[in-house]
């Protein structure tokens, strides 16, 4: 089963960070400031979805594969010894494009959209499909849902 | 961090395990302060400084264990209120920074003031230290409570998410601290000219007898709740004590801790045996080691196994981790022995302003 950051309404990872290096953006995305993170990994222990990862060693990316167009909170080369996580490709989604995982998925199994827009595809899915929330009992109010296509 | 054996599955290991344990040792020193100041035990009052010096050394060790665990220790200043961004009161780690530093300052002040007054040959003024001593008693409880809340507050880690964790931390701290102090006082009494009365040793032994039994009771209580209920939330406890799906690295480890604690408990209640120095020290070493395992690797590592997504990835510290841990322990011993080396001549009146050693 695929899993990623659930961008929770009540993110436990944000509460535990001792230096406010991670927070929820006004549009609901949970982000990390890689230049401020001290690498204590408390958020990694707090996340019930194993969505946060630590950069144990120095990321190696061949020079020709490096995207020169990088955002501060999103698609940048992660520095060593800090946390990282999914940002719902905010450098793309805030420009109206889809996250990279949606474009890559050959089955079209993923839906992304604005929960506040009642005409969006994601609202249609939530209203008409069988939905389940992983570890709903944690009370973190994820903004990531699993649905049954049938 | 790349040379440790920690992973995204077991993201805290030997360092944080030792951190948790030494915070307990620091808090355990208070078991000398309470008899000395609240029950006005005169003999204990004479030796209480060994407990306070222990707290200083242990807190410095605790801070070092956190520092070596940080990915970016050079950014520790982000934690300093004022310059950095301090997530207080929301993050338990920010509380921990406050209470540990506060406890260090309190003990530095109390020890420093009392020793300096002795050195000057003056009577210490109560107003300058007694209020701090009483604050430090409550503070000692707080450092270990906050450290327990750091784990207990994580809903995604069922092994830690228990209301019993903080009481267990405190009671096992009151094993590790007094056990260490009994050994220290015995060694000081034997190797130095400083006379250690029988009273304080007896008091510490009485405390140890109670805490060892309460600790075992709490472990049983926790185990019963986990094992009798069953279910996915109890997987970590089953992994720790019996192994899970063929993975059982921690099983011999935790059962040796239980064995150490049980044997120590039986030994501690043999009054005749405990009058013999060697047996007393053996019992203390056993329960110290037992708690070190139980509250260290026996608590931190299984919290991550199975992971939040129920994958099993085991962890064994790398050689580098063991070496760095040994280094911090060595430094802690160095600080403690050096502090005692300074304190004893002052306490015995050999090194004072008037009578300087030649």
Image (spheres, helix red, strand yellow):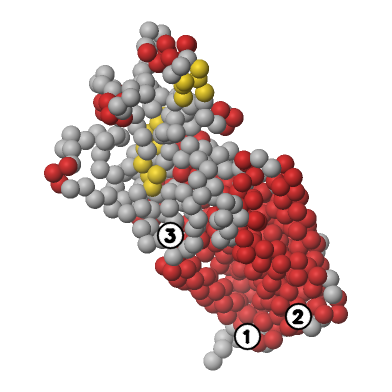
Question: Which label belongs to residue B338?
Answer: none
Query: Which chain contains the residue that carries disc 3?
Result: B
Q: Is mark 1 on a helix, strand or loop?
A: loop
Q: Is residue B261 above or below residue B215?
A: below
Query: For this view, does B8 lie left or right of residue B181?
Result: left
Q: Can residue B122 be seen in this view?
A: no
Q: Is residue A146 visible?
A: yes
Q: Do labels 2 and 1 share a chain?
A: yes
Q: Earlier in the sequence, mark 2 or mark 1?
A: 2
The x, y position of residue B28, in whole percent, is: 67, 62
Q: Which of marks 1 and 3 is nearer the N terminus?
A: 3
Name which quarter of the figure residue A88 lies in: top left
The residue sitting at 37% across, 23% down in the picture is: A109
How many angstroms separate mark 3 from mark 2 (CA)? 37 Å
Q: Mark 1 points at which residue?
A: B350
**Residue contact at pointers 3 and 2, CB within 8 angstroms:** no
Q: Is mark 3 on a helix, strand or loop?
A: loop
In front of the other: B106 or A99: A99
Q: Name the residue under label 2.
A: B279
Quadrant of the image containing the N terminus of chain A: top left
Question: Which label belongs to residue B5?
Answer: 3
């Amino acid at each position: 089963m695929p899993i990623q950051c659930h961008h929770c309404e009540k993110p436990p990872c944000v509460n535990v960070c001792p230096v406010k290096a991670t927070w929820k953006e006004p549009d609901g995305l949970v982000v990390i400031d890689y230049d401020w993170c001290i690498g204590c990994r408390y958020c990694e222990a707090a996340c019930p979805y194993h969505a946060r990862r630590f950069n144990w060693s120095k990321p190696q990316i061949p020079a020709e594969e490096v995207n020169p167009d990088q955002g501060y909170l999103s698609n940048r080369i992660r520095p060593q010894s800090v946390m990282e996580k999914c940002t719902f490709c905010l450098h793309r989604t805030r420009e109206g494009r889809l996250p990279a995982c949606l474009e890559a998925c050959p089955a079209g199994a993923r839906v992304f959209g604005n929960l506040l827009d009642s005409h969006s595809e994601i609202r249609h899915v939530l209203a008409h499909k069988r939905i389940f929330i992983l570890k709903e009992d944690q009370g973190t109010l994820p903004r990531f849902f699993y649905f049954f296509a049938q | 961090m790349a040379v440790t054996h920690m992973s995204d599955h077991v993201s805290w290991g030997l360092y944080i395990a030792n951190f948790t344990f030494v915070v307990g040792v620091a808090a355990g020193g208070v078991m000398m302060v309470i008899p000395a100041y609240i029950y006005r035990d005169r003999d204990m009052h004479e030796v209480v400084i060994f407990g306070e010096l222990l707290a200083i050394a242990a807190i410095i060790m605790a801070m070092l264990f956190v520092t070596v665990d940080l990915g970016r220790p050079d950014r520790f200043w982000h934690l300093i209120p004022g310059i950095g961004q301090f997530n207080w009161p929301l993050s338990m780690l920010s509380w921990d920074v406050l209470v540990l530093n506060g406890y260090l300052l309190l003990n530095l002040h109390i020890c420093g003031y009392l020793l300096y007054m002795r050195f000057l040959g003056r009577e210490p003024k109560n107003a300058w230290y007694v209020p701090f001593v009483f604050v430090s008693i409550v503070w000692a409880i707080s450092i270990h409570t906050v450290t327990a809340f750091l784990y207990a507050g994580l809903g995604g880690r069922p092994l830690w998410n228990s209301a019993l964790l903080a009481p267990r931390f405190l009671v096992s701290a009151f094993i590790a601290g007094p056990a260490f102090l009994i050994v220290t006082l015995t060694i000081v009494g034997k190797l130095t000219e400083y006379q250690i009365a029988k009273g304080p040793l007896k008091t510490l032994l009485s405390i140890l007898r109670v805490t060892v039994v309460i600790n075992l009771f709490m472990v049983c209580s926790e185990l019963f709740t986990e094992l009798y209920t069953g279910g996915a939330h109890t997987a970590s406890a089953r992994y720790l004590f019996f192994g899970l799906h063929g993975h059982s690295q921690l099983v011999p480890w935790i059962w040796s801790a239980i064995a150490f604690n049980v044997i120590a408990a039986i030994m501690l209640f043999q009054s005749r045996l405990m009058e013999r120095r060697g047996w007393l020290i053996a019992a203390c070493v056993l329960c110290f080691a037992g708690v070190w395992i139980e509250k260290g690797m026996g608590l931190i590592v299984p919290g991550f196994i199975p992971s939040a997504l129920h994958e099993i990835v085991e962890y064994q510290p790398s050689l580098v981790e063991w070496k760095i841990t040994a280094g911090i322990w060595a430094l802690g011993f160095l600080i403690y022995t050096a502090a005692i080396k300074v304190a004893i001549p002052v306490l015995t009146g050999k090194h004072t302003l008037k009578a300087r050693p030649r």
